[in-house]
Image (cartoon, coloured by chain):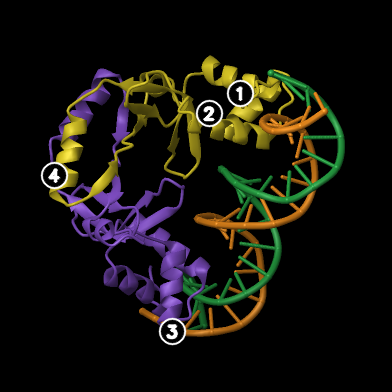
Chain colours: A purple, B yellow, C orange, D green
DNA sequence: TTATCTGCAAACATTTTGCAGCGAG
DNA sequence: CTCGCTGCAAAATGTTTGCAGATAA
């Protein structure tokens, strides 16, 4: 069974503190700034565990880096992610789901995942560039 | 200006020969199997150039690997990609575009990109597993 | 001729893994 | 006490870059 270590708790609390999409490195740095001594590998291992347990969402930035974010709603959902600051907003359920199923079926595809995340620049970042 | 070298042509022809999403490594291997002597770095450099010129589409697999595919239509479009064999089908234009703009605007986001690619298992692969 | 391209190897960035020791339960 | 977890360093990936030589135009 799983143990609750200081490190695991620190990673989880950091994810809760900043509910935006962050890279493992960012989380690692923030933890150090806060005085927590956590190894980078441990951050990765815990993020992986959390992802398996569906407690965090994972997505890939355009550059190929994995970004993690605390999972707020249990239901399937999408994100609107700011490519400047990582701020993310969950997108309300929509007609997308059924659209995807239709498309997939009509092309003979099965087991289709649609991790459709939208990247843009949030209001805050476009107001105060850099 | 750009020169048309044997290597550049080989990469481009390989992309044309197999119009599915492939990794740089896959393309590199195939070229070697065909007897072309092309360096891996050259494959990467040419794929990059082709992407800049919008002659190939680029997307990231869930594992973070970049996948390249010859660009068939000039218009903006999406893909339905087989996660087993890489086979891709372009998805007909849809109401998605306007839906994305609406969502983005209502959240105050600008410059939104929606590289929404769907991953699934194509008919062929689900018929003959492995 | 000459600026661009290539191959190779080294550098990079991100992520994973091996292993000895630590510590939660 | 035990087994899972940690830290570190090394390895594995995927991709980029520096440089000297090759080559298209």
Q: Chain of mark 3?
A: A
Within-10-Å neighbours for mark 3: few <14, some 14–19, many 20+: few
Kindly identify the residue that appears in the image at 30 percent across and 19 percent down.
A108
Taking C1 as reference, is A56 left or right?
A: left
Describe the element under mark 1 as helix, strand or loop: helix
Q: How many marks?
A: 4
- The mark closer to the camera, 2 or 3, is 2
Residue B75's label in the rendered image is: none
Within-10-Å neighbours for mark 4: few <14, some 14–19, many 20+: few
Q: Chain of mark 1?
A: B
Within-10-Å neighbours for mark 2: few <14, some 14–19, many 20+: many
State how far apart marks 1 and 3 are (Cα). Answer: 50 Å
Q: Position of residue A24 (x, y in %)?
A: 44, 63
**Is B49 above or below relative to B108?**
above
- The mark closer to the camera, 1 or 2, is 2
Q: Please say if the residues under marks 4 and 1 sit with CB atoms less than 8 Å apart.
A: no
Kindly identify the residue that appears in the image at 24 percent across and 24 percent down.
A103
Residue that badge 4 annotates? A93
The answer as to whether the residues below labels 1 and 3 share one chain is no
Q: Residue furthest top?
A: B17
Q: Position of residue A126 (x, y in %)?
A: 27, 56
Residue B70: in sight, yes or no?
Answer: yes
Residue that badge 2 annotates? B50
Residue A35's label in the rendered image is: 3
Kindly identify the residue that appears in the image at 33 percent across and 22 percent down.
B75
Taking A71 as reference, is A8 left or right?
A: right
Residue B11's label in the rendered image is: 1
Kindly identify the residue that appears in the image at 45 percent across and 70 percent down.
A28
Q: Please say if the residues under marks 2 and 3 sit with CB atoms less than 8 Å apart.
A: no
Residue A45: in sight, yes or no?
Answer: no
Taking A20 as reference, is D17 left or right?
A: right
């Amino acid at each position: 069974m799983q143990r609750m270590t200081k490190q695991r708790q620190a990673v989880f609390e950091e994810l809760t503190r900043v509910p935006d999409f962050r890279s493992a490195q960012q989380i690692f740095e923030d933890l150090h700034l806060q005085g927590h001594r956590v190894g980078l590998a441990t951050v990765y291992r815990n993020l992986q565990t959390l992802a398996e347990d569906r407690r965090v969402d994972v997505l890939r930035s355009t550059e190929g880096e994995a970004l993690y974010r605390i999972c707020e709603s249990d239901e399937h959902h999408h994100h609107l992610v700011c490519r400047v600051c990582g701020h993310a907003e969950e997108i309300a359920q929509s007609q997308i789901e059924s659209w995807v199923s239709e498309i997939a079926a009509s092309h003979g595809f099965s087991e289709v995942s649609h991790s459709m995340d939208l990247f843009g620049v949030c209001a805050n970042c476009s107001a105060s560039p850099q």
